[in-house]
Amino acid sequence: MRRVGTELPRRDPRTVARAQGLFHVVGGAWPLVSCRTFARGYGPVSDEWPQKTSGGLLLFAGCGMLRAASEEDGVRHARRVGVGTALTSAQRRGR
């Protein structure tokens, strides 16, 4: 039995894919544009290449999600990319 007012609104899958893609583009570009401010936000690092590599991969995953969101069968592709990046990021941060 559902209580009144507890149901979440449904989101358009294309809108979700675009929002997540944009989030990944901005988050991935940040260490590429300024490692100094990225390190200020996430802590100092001894070597910048892992942040730049992860940022570049995240940037292009986001670009793929943005492009996929505008195609007919793209929502499923964007969902797979989103789940993959989330699982990879969670594993990377769990160390």
Image (tube, helix red, strand yellow):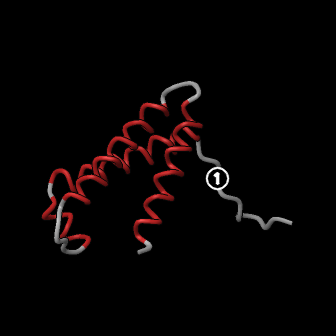
Which residue shows up at 59% across the image and 46% down it?
11
Residue ID for mark 1? 9
Asked which secondary structure carries label 1, the reply is: loop
Disc 1 crowd rating (10 Å Cα; few below 14, some 14-19, many 20+) is few
Which residue shows up at 57% across the image and 24% down it?
72
Which residue shows up at 50% across the image and 42% down it?
17
Residue 28, above or below 60: below
**Closest to the observer, 88 or 18:** 88
Residue 21, above or below 1: above
Q: Position of residue 55 (x, y in %)?
A: 28, 52
- Extreme top residue here? 72
Place residue 30 in its image quadrant: bottom left
**Side of 10 relative to 1 (left or right):** left
Name the amino acid type tagged 1. Answer: Pro
**Side of 21 relative to 31 (left or right):** right
Q: Position of residue 26 (x, y in %)?
A: 30, 49
Q: Position of residue 27 (x, y in %)?
A: 31, 54
Q: Position of residue 69 (x, y in %)?
A: 49, 33
